[in-house]
Image (tube, rainbow, N blue to C red):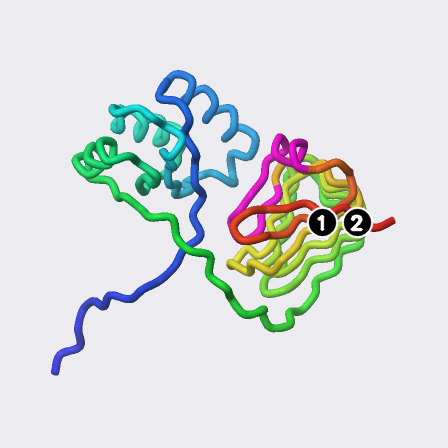
Amino acid sequence: MATPSLELKGASFTLSVLHLYSTDLDIFATELAAKISQAPQFFLGAPLVINLSGVEAVELDIPAIKQIMKQQQLILLGFTGANDILAKQIREAGLALLKTGKTMVTPPPPPSETRILKQNIRSGQQIYAQNSDLIIFGNVGNGAEVIADGNIHIFGALRGKAMAGAKGNRHAVILARKLEAELVSIAGQYWLSENLTQHTDSTSGCIRLDGDSLVFETLPL
C-alpha cells in the first residue's frame, strides 16, 4: 500500500490578535506604523488575526486593510469577532473567519537548564538561551534582545526586549530589578513600552501569563 503524500492533524498555534476599533483606514495605517516602529524585528513577517468585535460598521475595505498590513510586512491570516455582514465580506475576500479559542491547560514543563551571564547586554546584541532559563547579572540596554525558552531573570535594568517561553512555555516569567523594557513577551503574548506604563506601578517586577493575558506583579523588596 502506497504511503500517503499528506495527512491532516489538529494543532494549536499562538497568534497575535490586532483589535480594530475604527474603520478609518488612514488612522489605522498611521497607528499601526507607529506601533510596529517600536519593535520592527519582533513584528517582521508576523502572522496576525484582526478582531472586529469593537467595530459596528457594515462595510469594511478588506483589500485595503490587507495592503496596509503588507506594507508593514505583516501577514493577515483572517478575522475574528465579525458581525454577519462583515463575515460575508471576509469570506468573499478569501480570508479565514476564526473563532476565539478556549484557554488550554497545559502541564508544567520539565526542569530546564540555566544559562548565566555576568555582563551587560548592549544595543544590537541578541542572546538566546535555548531549552533553558536565562539569568543576567547586568543590564539589558536599549536595542538589545534577550530570548529564552524558559524564564528570564535580570538582576539589573531591562531597557531592551525580553522574550521568555520562546517555544510556547506559558509558565515562563520575566523578572527584572528595573523594568523599562521596549518589549516583553511570554509564549508569543507581548506588551510594548506603552502597555507596561499602563499596567505597572513599579519599576521592579515580574511579568507572567494569566490565561491569555500578561500580568504584572511587584517584586518584594
Q: Earlier in the sequence, mark 1 or mark 2?
A: 1
Distance from Cα at disc 1 to Cα at disc 2: 6 Å
Q: Which residue is mark 2?
A: 219
- Above or below, 133 against 39 in this view is below
Is label 1 in contact with label 2 (beta carbons under 8 Å)?
yes
Q: What residue range appears in magenta?
A: 184-199
Residue 207 spot, x, y in % from top left: 67, 48
The foreground one among 215 and 151 is 215
Question: Residue 206 — which label?
Answer: 1
* Residue at 53% across, 28% down: 37
- The residue type indicated by label 2 comes to Leu
Q: Residues within 10 Å of mark 1 (few under 14, many from 20)?
A: some
Question: Residue 120 — which label?
Answer: none
- Above or below, 29 against 181 in this view is above
Left or right relative to 2: residue 218: right
* Residue at 64% across, 69% down: 112
Quadrant in the picture for residue 165? bottom right
Q: Is residue 141 visible?
A: no
